[in-house]
Amino acid sequence: MVLPEGNESGTPTFILLGFSEYSEIQVLLFLLFLAIYTVTVVGNLGMIIIIKINPKLHTIMYFFLSHLSFVDFCYSTVVTPKLLENLVVEDRTISFSGCILQFCFACIFGVTETFMLAAMAYDRFVAVCSPLLYTTAMSQKLCALLVSGSYTWGIVCSLTLTYFLLKLSYCESSIIDNFICDHSVIVSVSCSDPYLSQMLCFAVAVFNETSSLMVILASYVLIFTAVMKMPSASGRSKTFSTCASHLAAITIFHGTILFLYCVPNLKTSRLIVKVASVFYTIMIPMLNPLIYSLRNKDVKDMFGKLVLTKLLCH
């Protein structure tokens, strides 16, 4: 990275303002985000463990769900600890390398989740529309390819965007009015022209959202059409119930992303952007395991058995 001459020297550092302007509720925010992060860790790791030890859940749908839980756990862990730290310490600085790494990993897991949800939509489409060919169509090889492809594309997008961020020059000390090193806030404190990096990020975001939503919408249009042709009302209800959890997770995830990037004026909507960012980076990883577990009897039964076993052991 080349720093321009003048008031830039050495390795730049950033100051994450986060929610520092609300000094009177710092403790309350810390306790709130700590509780959310605790539920996120327990919920997602618990979901992975339950799927691993319960033979009934060794299905394709839960294969995808276990990876979704892993991605949510990692995504939250990349963002939340630094937020919690900044709520209890006066020094809110983050090194340049730390900021870039946070963006890099957050981008990997964010993009991966986008396409993981699309893969799960395709899985539901095959299960509902071609139940007799399901095991053949959704082979282990295809499932592994869909999951590995989601991770790989997330890494490719992240490394590409990170490379162009590193090509920019930065002032020695810059203030970031957010709690996370997002692409938009990093380029906003650049001392060089970030146009190319911004356009590339825009193109990647549009491609990811458009392609994943096309798969999801096409899958659920075909699912809805197939369900409405079912002669049995109970059959329709059962199928809708099976897809409801995934549809709820998709709606929350993509709804938040679209809202976040459609805020008309970022300069006058900083609080809205921060709240939306909290929901996107911290709340959604907590909600996903709750959405899937509360609607699944096998998961709830297995969780109850684990808790009962733990209590008996003590």
Image (spheres, helix red, strand yellow):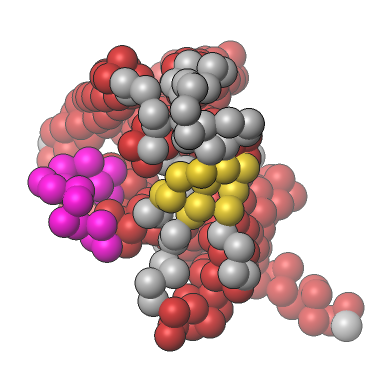
Magenta stretch, main secondary structure class: helix
Q: Position of residue 302 (x, y in %)?
A: 65, 63
Of 95 and 161, which appears nearest the observer?
Answer: 95
Q: Quadrant of residue 303?
A: bottom right
Question: Per the image, is 270 magenta?
Answer: yes
Seen in the picture, residue 70 relative to 200 is either above or below; the reply is below
Tell whether position 18 is magenta: no
74 on left or right of 308: left
Residue at the spot 25% in from the left edge and 57% down from the top edge: 270
**Which portion, as a residue range, is magenta?**
256-272
Q: Residue at x 48, y 16 (%)?
A: 167
Asked if residue 116 shows in the view, the reply is: no
Quadrant of the rendering where the C terminus is positioned:
bottom right
Q: Quadrant of the N terminus?
A: top right
Residue 199, position as x, y percentages in the image:
26, 19
Q: Is residue 270 above or below residue 6?
A: below
Q: Is residue 283 left or right of residue 77?
A: left
Looking at the image, how many numbered discs can be counted on the residues? 0
In the image, 39 versus 105, the foreground residue is 105
Tell me the residue at 19%/51% (across/down). Answer: 267
Residue 281 x/y as whole percent = 44, 51
Rendered residue at 39%/29% (across/down): 191
Q: Residue 168 sits in which quadrant? A: top left
Question: In the rendered image, is residue 11 in sight?
Answer: yes
In this view of the protein, which residue sits in the foreground, 312 or 170? 170
In the displayed orientation, state which residue is furthest to the front: 6
Q: Between residue 229 and residue 156, name the one nearer to us.
A: 156
Report x, y in % for residue 313: 88, 78
**Relative height, residue 120 to residue 21 (above, below):** above
Q: Residue furthest right?
A: 313
